[in-house]
Amino acid sequence: MKKIFVINGHQYYPFAEGKLNKTFVDKATELFKSEGYEVKYTATEKEYNVDEEIEKFLWADVVFVQSPLNWMGISWSFKKYLDEVLTAGMMGKLSAGDGRNAEAPKENYGLGGLLDAKYMFSFTANAPKEAFNDPNEKFFKGISEDDLLLPMHLNMEWFGLKPLATFFAYDVMKNADIPNDLIRFNKHIKEELIQKM
């Protein structure tokens, strides 16, 4: 049985209560279970035990992250979670340091990961799809969604996790199209995760 660790990185704000991210988490979990996957779950704004979270990373075949895009990154609660959990696992269970050794102190930085699993990001964003991948757009200057998320990708890859395609729900606060987003999300999970496992 395949094992999926689902992380909800939302943090409550009065203007963003987390209902949409929870909907995506619920839909993904329902789909995973219908395909026979075992699922473990963490919401980063709730209480958690660091040692138990490390064990979830070790247990998982896939780490599925659902999060809002928050100030061009992730929420404070999710950042705090990563700081606490990944730092605790960095020198032992999740990675053997930063990948370098005494014989080659300038080589292989970031390649000490001990996990043999995959990860998938799913983000909700206020930005429209058209803001990305277009050099004529002055704010992002042509970068892609994954370019914007590069620090998060590097965090996962530091621990040996391999990427699956990222999902984005765009313009969710001003021009939301949730029914279509959910259709795209379901298709994305099936094609980019379930069929590739």
Image (spheres, grey):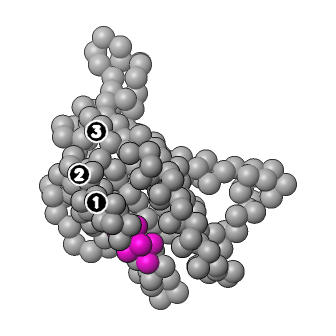
List x then y, in percent, for residue 65: 40, 60
Q: Which residue is mark 3?
A: 115
Q: Earlier in the sequence, mark 3 or mark 1?
A: 1
Q: Secondary structure at mark 1?
A: loop
Label 3 packing within 10 angstroms: few (<14), some (14-19), many (20+): many
Residue under pointer 2? 1
Q: Position of residue 35 (x, y in %)?
A: 34, 60
Q: For marks 3 and 2, give the CA distance.
A: 18 Å
- Crowd around label 1: few <14 · some 14–19 · many ≥20 (10 Å): few
- Secondary structure under the numbered disc 3 in the rendered image: loop
Numbered mark located on residue 112 in the image:
none
Is 147 rendered above or below residue 80?
A: above
Q: Earlier in the sequence, mark 1 or mark 2?
A: 2
Report which residue position mark 1 lands on: 36
Residue type, mark 1 in image: Gly
The magenta segment: 23-29
Task: Determine the residue positioned at 17% across, 51% down.
Answer: 55
Would residue 61 be found to the left or right of residue 19 on screen? left
Residue 16, above or below 143: below
Horizontal side, residue 144 vs residue 73: left or right:
right
Q: Are marks 1 and 2 in contact (CB under 8 Å)?
A: yes
- Give the crowd class for mark 2: few <14, some 14-19, many >=20 residues within 10 Å: few
**Residue 78, x across and y down, in percent:** 37, 64
Mark 3 vs mark 2, foreground winner is 2
Amino acid type of disc 2? Met
Q: Secondary structure at mark 2?
A: loop
Can residue 155 be spotted in the picture?
no
Q: Give the side of residue 116 with respect to residue 64, left or right.
A: left
Tell which residue pokes out farthest to the top in this image: 103
